[in-house]
């Protein structure tokens, strides 16, 4: 059954983001459960999510924030856990207030415009969706233009820089300039993982951190590397590579990304 905009706002469907096949979960609700329980496992259970889906949501949230919203706690009598930062708690409070105000606005629009539902659904189709597992929000630090392509350096926080090579036409089309905000996206299979120190590669981007999750599949495995500042990089590598590199939780690793494999995007 298709719900009208007014019915959707009352049922709380609109603020929810689709982050898993066949199911919709609210990122803010997940943050609230983490804050209350101090555990990603307990929060996932409360949401009806898998542990893996919960961590993927948390990693995506952290990568799109200037400051970490969720942090891991190690040690202690209870063996550590997962908590919200003060910035995360503030964000949840502000968003919930904004959510309430938005619902009131949408209800009023639906009351005064008979065809509001039709146009609202059309507008929502323009929302950006991407299959790239790695999405970072940052600011443009520098732009160096060549004959055809330009080198764009992005500051994604935590002392981490990403260098992207795109066409001059794309720089103009996106309206990029020093200080402007943009998203850097990288597909997980494009990320190369190494544990070696001091090697020379053609990859412009070297993001060093610690493996926090490593899960093997039938042929390939998923490796998540946590960087300084709490952001994470997801890589898809073969199971043989995981074994030969000795990748497991706690191992220091480096994510290598070619500048040509970084896609830049901006909000309209």
Image: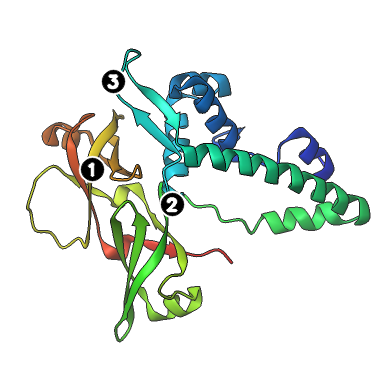
Q: Which residue is mark 2?
A: 66
Q: Which mark is nearer the camera, 2 or 1?
A: 2
Q: Is residue 88 visible?
A: yes
**For the view shown, which residue lies furthest in the bottom direction?**
147
Image quadrant holding the N terminus, namely top right
The residue positioned 31% from the left and 48% from the top of the image is 189
Mark 2 surroundings within 10 Å by alpha-carbon count, few (fewer than 14), some (14 through 19), many (20 or more): some
Q: Count up the numbered dots.
A: 3
Q: Residues within 10 Å of mark 3 (few under 14, many from 20)?
A: few
Question: Could you tell me which residue is drawn at 35 percent across and 64 percent down?
Answer: 154
Q: Say which quarter of the image contains residue 81.
A: top left
Q: Earlier in the sequence, mark 2 or mark 3?
A: 2
Mark 2: secondary structure: loop
Q: Which quadrant of the figure has residue 59? A: top left
106 relative position to 112: left or right: left
Residue 226 position within the rendered picture, expressed as x and y whole percent measured from the top left:
30, 40
Reply above or below: 230 against 150. above
Mark 3 residue element: loop
Which residue is denoted by mark 1 in the rendering? 209
Residue 230 horizontal/vertical position (percent): 35, 42
Q: Quadrant of residue 99?
A: top right
Q: Nearer the viewer, residue 189 or 234?
A: 234
Label 3 sits on residue: 75
- Chain-order first, disc 2 or disc 1: 2
Display colour scheme: rainbow
For the residues labelled 3 and 1, the Cα–Cα distance comes to 20 Å
């Amino acid at each position: 059954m298709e719900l009208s905009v007014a019915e959707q706002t009352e049922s709380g469907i609109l603020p929810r983001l689709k982050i898993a096949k066949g199911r919709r979960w609210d990122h803010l609700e997940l943050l609230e459960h983490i804050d209350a329980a101090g555990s990603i496992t307990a929060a996932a259970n409360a949401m009806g999510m898998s542990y893996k889906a919960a961590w993927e949501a948390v990693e995506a949230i952290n990568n799109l924030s200037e400051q970490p919203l969720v942090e891991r706690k190690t040690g202690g009598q209870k063996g550590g856990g997962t908590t919200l930062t003060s910035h995360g708690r503030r964000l949840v409070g502000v968003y919930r207030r904004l959510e309430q105000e938005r619902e009131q606005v949408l209800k009023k629009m639906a009351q005064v415009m008979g065809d509001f539902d039709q146009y609202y659904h059309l507008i929502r189709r323009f929302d950006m969706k991407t299959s790239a597992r790695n999405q970072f929000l940052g600011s443009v630090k520098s732009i160096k233009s060549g004959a055809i392509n330009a080198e764009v350096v992005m500051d994604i926080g935590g002392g981490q820089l990403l260098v992207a090579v795109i066409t001059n036409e794309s720089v103009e089309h996106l309206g990029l300039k020093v200080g402007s905000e943009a998203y850097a996206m990288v597909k997980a299979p494009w990320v190369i993982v190494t544990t070696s120190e001091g090697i020379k590669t053609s990859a412009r981007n070297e993001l060093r951190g610690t493996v926090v999750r490593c899960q093997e599949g039938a042929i390939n495995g998923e490796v998540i590397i946590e960087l300084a500042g709490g952001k994470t990089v997801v890589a898809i590598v073969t199971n043989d590579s995981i074994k030969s590199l000795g990748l497991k939780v706690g191992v220091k690793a480096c994510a290598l990304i070619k500048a040509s494999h970084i896609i830049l995007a901006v909000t309209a």
